Amino acid sequence: MSELHPQSRAVALGLWVLTGTRDESEKDAGISHFVEHLVFKGTKTRSAFQIAKALESLGGELNAYTTREYTCYHAIVLKDHWKKGLEILCDLVANMEISREDFVVEKSVILQEIAMGEDNLEELIYDIYFEKTLGKSPLAKPILGEEKSISAMTLKQIHSYYRERYSGSNIILSAAGCVDHQELADGLQEFLASKKKRRFKKTRRRPGHKAIRAVVEKEAEQLHLLVGLPCSSFRDKYRFEAFVVNTLLGGGMTSKLYQSIREKRGLVYTIYSSLNTFEDFGIINIYAACEPKNMKAVIRSLVSEIRRVRKTGVTENELEMFKTQVIGGILLGSDDIENRMTSVGVNEMVFEKYKPVEAIVEEIKEVTVKSVNEFMERYLNLQDAGWLLMGGQASKFEQYLKELKL
């Protein structure tokens, strides 16, 4: 799937492998991310240095990332070099070839990455939250995997996973920029024609969400709070209402929580909400960090604000402001061809069709006061919320969380 931007000097390309953390078994935990690292160590035709040099020497960029539902290999190049960019991406997903030495070295790198993650509490709290609230679902597992699973992983596991998942209909291409769609299709056929057409059958199940009240003691100056409210998925009819409500709650400096908790009361430096959406499940998370002495006041204010918003609903003027904020962000982002490549790819994965920016904007415009209030009535229910506190004095708040009348 591609989107033409004839005025652009560049082309952004993405090869998406439709497998991620939620498709891993217990013993394979972290393997999607591990493979993402390893493909850059070498292919049948290129060394690690040659992979890096191939596009950088042309002024281009090459990178990758892993999520809970997919892995994306992406490149941005000048329009005259789009075919080289596509060739490199196809080489990565079709021709990985690594030595045992490279495997051992990269395993060490990932174990260090996992250890480093323990020091970043703002990121760590999300992994712990998912583990505690989503139970046995693979979605609960951290993307990096765990020390135990990575340490035990074998080269045979890696090769088996790569052969099975990196093939056939499990790979899609998205592109945006100054490039012809048919030429892209021809190039993809040229570079991946010899790839065996295995079909990997996903067995994804929608996770349940536990309304936890938990604390994690961790040495830190501040207390970190993460609240989660299960909400609509990518395919839910309320998916655009979720974007608007997320913006209303904590999407910027005009949001309800930022204004009431930071601006008016000065209880925190950082507070925001984020929308974590999957093909069949979603969570609105609210994050705040503050001095321990302020945490009870932060929790009381947060509870009060969510209850007030849910009870009074949104006004027409508020809705228009937050819709405009969402639409503005989408339109500004659409000037970036890498953003458009990503959007084209995600829509192909989720809906199996192309959605132009204009169509998405029109869908957001159709969001009404009634539909937003229905969303909030359905999803902003604090009885369903999960609460996680982490920090140096977290245990002092354990009883307080239990006593919350939610």
Image (tube, helix red, strand yellow):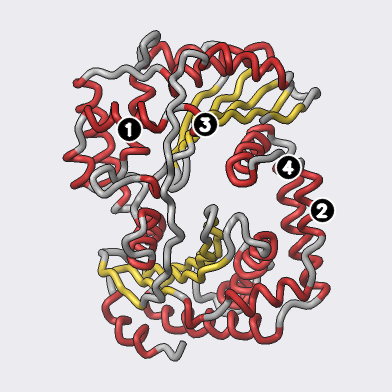
**What residue does disc 3 label?**
169
Residue 113 in the image: above or below residue 198: below
In this orientation, which residue lies closer to the viewer: 50 or 72? 72
Q: CA distance from mark 3 to mark 2?
A: 31 Å
Q: Position of residue 131 (x, y in %)?
A: 33, 61
**What residue does disc 1 label?**
161
Are circles 3 and 2 on residues that touch, CB within 8 Å? Answer: no
How dense is the environment of label 1, judged by Cα within 10 Å: few (below 14), some, or many (20 and up)? some
Q: Position of residue 64 (x, y in %)?
A: 47, 32
Split into 4 quadrants, where in the image is the N terminus?
top right
Q: CA distance from mark 3 to mark 4?
A: 20 Å
Q: Residue at x 71, y 18 (%)?
A: 182
Residue 253 badge: none
Residue 362 badge: 2
Q: CA distance from mark 1 to mark 4?
A: 32 Å
| N-terminal label among 3 and 4 | 3
**What residue does disc 4 label?**
355
How dense is the environment of label 3, judged by Cα within 10 Å: few (below 14), some, or many (20 and up)? few
Are circles 4 and 2 on residues that touch, CB within 8 Å? Answer: no
Q: Quadrant of residue 201?
A: top left
Residue 269 can be seen in this image = no
Q: CA distance from mark 2 to mark 1?
A: 41 Å
* SS of the residue under disc 4: loop
Between label 1 and label 3, give the one nearer the viewer. 3
| N-terminal label among 3 and 2 | 3
Q: Amino acid at mark 2?
A: Glu
Q: Quadrant of residue 314?
A: bottom right
Q: Residue at x 39, y 17 (%)?
A: 95
How dense is the environment of label 2, judged by Cα within 10 Å: few (below 14), some, or many (20 and up)? few
